[in-house]
Amino acid sequence: MERELALEIVRVTELGALASARWIGRGDKHAADDAATAAIRSMFDSVSINGTVVIGEGEMDDAPMLYIGEQVGNADGPLVDVAVDPLEGTEVVASGLDNAQSVIAIADKGNLLHAPDIYMEKLACGPELAGKLHIEDPVEVTLQKASHFSGKSLSELTVMVLDRERHSDLIARLRAAGVRIKLLGHGDVAGAIAAALPDNEVDLYMGSGGAPEGVLAAAALKCLGGEMQGKLLPEGPFEMQRCLLMGIENPMGVLTMDDMVGTGDVIFAATGVTSGEFLSGVRFLGKDRAETHSVIMRAQSRTIRYIRSIHFLPGKRIPGRSADKQIAAM
C-alpha cells in the first residue's frame, strides 16, 4: 500500500464525521449513522483502492451500503480489506456525549478478520508490555506482570474499562488489587487505543466490547507498536455457527494481532465527531466552515499523524434532508 493512500483514507473519515456531527444532541442515532454511512460510501468512490468491506454495517440484506462483501474504491489501486465504522458511537452522538468518531482500517487483502457482530473479551497494552501478557491469565496475574515489566507499582498502574454492568466483577477485582481505574462511558475503539498512545496515563485496557471494534482497535495498536488480544464470546449455537460461517475455525480460541490484522501493512484513520480520549470533535465555526481533528497511522512506518483541517461547507446542512442531498451540499 502506498503511503499517499493514508491521506486519501482520512479524507473519507473527515466527511463521515462532518456529516454525522450535525446530529449531535438531536436524539436521533439512526439519522446520525445514516448520514455518516452515506457520506463515507460516496467518498470511497474517489479512493485509489480495489477494496472489499470485511467489517461494515452488516450483511447486504440488512445494510444498503458498506455491507460486508461490498466493493469500494475506484478499482485503481491495491487489493485491500476494509474495516469501517462510519460512526462509532451512534447513541453518543444522539445524546451529545464524548468519544464518537468515524473510523477506517485497511490492510492487504485477506488480512483483516471477518469479525461477527458479537462480544469479544479484550486485553490491550502499549509497546512496553506487548508480547508479555496473556488474556487467559487471571486478572491478578496480568496486573503483576504489567507491574513487573513496566517498573510501576500496582498503585501506579491505570486500567481503562468500559463502565458497564457486565464489568462489575472485573472492576471489583481491579480495585481489590489496588490499581487505578479509569472508567470509560463510551468509545470501545478509543479506549483500547488509549493504552498504547505515547505519553498516555493508561497502561491496560480490559473487558468486553464489540468484536468488529476489536479488529479496528487492533489495526491502530499494530500501528502504535502495542498489542491487542481477544477472545470471542459467542452466546448460544446461533452465534457459534455465525463464527464458523465467517471462517473462524476455533471461535473459543485466543485471537492474536496476526489473527485480527495479519502480518502485512495496515493503515488506520479516525476523525473525531465528539471530543474523546485522543481526538477533538467537529467544531462548526460559522460562515460555512468547520474544523475536524483526525489521526492517521501506518504500521509499516509506525508514523502517527494528527491533522486539524478547516473545511468549507457550501450551503447549510439541514437535519432531515435526504442523504444524497446532504452530500451534494458539501
Image: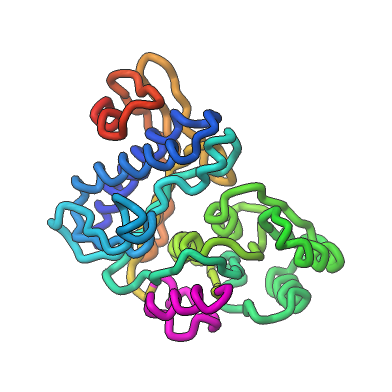
Quarter of the view holding residue 140: bottom right
Nearer the observer, 154 or 192 = 192
> Magenta residues?
234-261
Residue 42 position in % (x across, y down): 24, 42
Residue 180 vertical position relative to residue 328 in the rendered view, above or below: below
Residue 69 position in % (x across, y down): 27, 64
- The residue at the point 69 percent across, 74 percent down is 149
Residue 31 vertical position relative to residue 151 in the rendered view, above or below: above
Q: Is residue 44 within the magenta segment? A: no
Q: In which quarter of the image is the N terminus?
A: bottom left
Tell me if I can see residue 222 in this picture: yes
- Residue 178 lies left or right of residue 206; in this view the side is right
Residue 221 position in % (x across, y down): 49, 63
Q: Quadrant of the C terminus?
A: top left
Which residue in the rendered view is the most extreme toward the top? Answer: 287
Residue 236 vertical position relative to residue 38 in the rendered view, above or below: below
- The residue at the point 25 percent across, 43 percent down is 43
Tell me if I can see residue 223 in this picture: no
Q: Is residue 247 within the magenta segment? A: yes
Residue 137 position in % (x across, y down): 69, 81
- The residue at the point 49 percent across, 39 percent down is 29
Quarter of the view holding residue 34: top left
- The residue at the point 50 percent across, 34 percent down is 28
Q: Which colour scheme is used?
A: rainbow
- Residue 273 lies left or right of residue 64; in this view the side is right
- Residue 199 lies left or right of residue 217; in this view the side is right
Nearer the observer, 329 or 235 = 235
How many numbered marks are there? 0
Which residue in the rendered view is the most extreme toward the left? Answer: 76
Nearer the observer, 255 or 227 = 255
